[in-house]
Amino acid sequence: MTIIALGINHKSAPVKLREKVAFSPDKLAHALQSCPQYTSAEQVVILSTCNRTEVYIQAKEPEDAQKLSEWLADFHQTDHETVRQHSYVKHGDDAINHLMRVACGLDSLIVGEPQILGQVKQAYTESKNAGKISTEFEKLFQSTFSVAKQVRTETEIGANAVSVAFAAVQLAKQIFSKLTHSNVLLIGAGETIELVAKHLVDAEAKSITVANRTLSRASKLADSLGGKAITISQIPEHLAQADIVISSTASSLPLISRSTVATALKVRKHKPMLLIDLAVPRDIENEVGELDDAYLYTVDDLQNIVEQNVANREVAAQQAEHMIGGMVASYGYWQQHYQNVDLIKNYREKAEKTRDDALQKALKQIGDGIAPDEAMKELAFKLTQAMLHGPTKALQQASKLSDDDNLKFLAKALGLEGTVKRKTGKQ
């Protein structure tokens, strides 16, 4: 029995293939029932996100890895060879280590991103609801959640911004402490501003106004945020209400001048204003930074923050790898013990049967007229012989093979420590 992980992710495959092999929520339940029909797996977990599709199984047969790949291709009606070329397969401890690294965000596009842990938990829950998790996978995933929590609480893996959009909002939070009383003006409606807007919503900004050349695009983004839309030309009349201005457009010329900001600050009675210019070329004149109560940061300022934070996350990632290694080893010890529970159980049952058989024979002998002391002597002899047979054979074999380590282990197990003689002879 071994654990196998088969996956396709942002490192191994283009987005076109990742989209093909993704499991939509309405197909996941069927997939969990279908997978064991192709393989010997009794336990299955399927993790499917925008950047990865991974299937974890507890396999009984070595060829299950190939069968798993074929199943994934057949389920999504995709070419077998294409899936094989763009997938990765991990076995045993490597599969366990990979799962834990994924849950901790170490295998993500952005190292340390927190969403993946929730996605792993959801995958586990779906599998459990489908009856595809039993003792070993229960222990595996609980160990995974435990180490992920440890990494989050004991390292700085998720504490530092590693995207310019996130860094912009983190900077605003540092300056204003909380954004619940801050009015934000976003200039532009592209991907960067959309990411900024998402982080602002998470930070519970008081209000968000979106300005764009095309009012319809501004309205589309503003509506999704519960905010207000204006055009670029309307910025001067709304600027005084903004505590935070974040801009990212494709304009070739600055959209906000020093004089415009100076006028707004007078209306604000010089209440401080934070301006973050993420555009190249700049959207905000550099001279704005000369104004009292106007705090201007450019994309270069934020990029320096991001680079430092990336370095900090790399240090945290090394700490996380050490924690994961410890948890993989811990799970391995538990797994080995669990898989040998039947061996111990069978050994005890065999000993109890030997005892019961010998006792029944002794009682029968007494019933047939043999003296009780003679029957007891024979019972003791037979039990001793039965108990000594296996260990004696093992000791003899270890002695013949000159297997000192095994001999010492057997001696210790049998309470014979210190009685093993070391080999002597010519060196």
Image: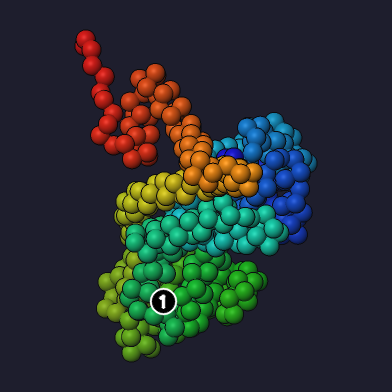
Residue 232 point in image, percent of width and height: 53, 72
Q: Is residue 240 visible?
A: yes
Residue 135 point in image, percent of width and height: 58, 55
Residue 219 occupies quadrant: bottom right
> Mark 1 packing: few (<14 Cα in 10 Å), some, or many (20+)?
many
Residue 262 occupies quadrant: bottom left
Residue positioned most to the top = 426
Q: Is residue 216 above or below residue 122?
A: below
194 left or right, relative to 223: left
41 left or right, relative to 374: right
Report the residue at 32% width, 75% height from top.
175
Quadrant location of the N terminus in the rendered image: top right
Residue 170 point in image, percent of width and height: 39, 69
Quadrant location of the C terminus in the rendered image: top left
Q: Secondary structure at mark 1?
A: strand
Report the residue at 37% width, 38% height from top.
414
Kindly identify which residue carries mark 1: 244
Which amino acid, by three-letter code, is at mark 1?
A: Ile
426 left or right, relative to 30: left
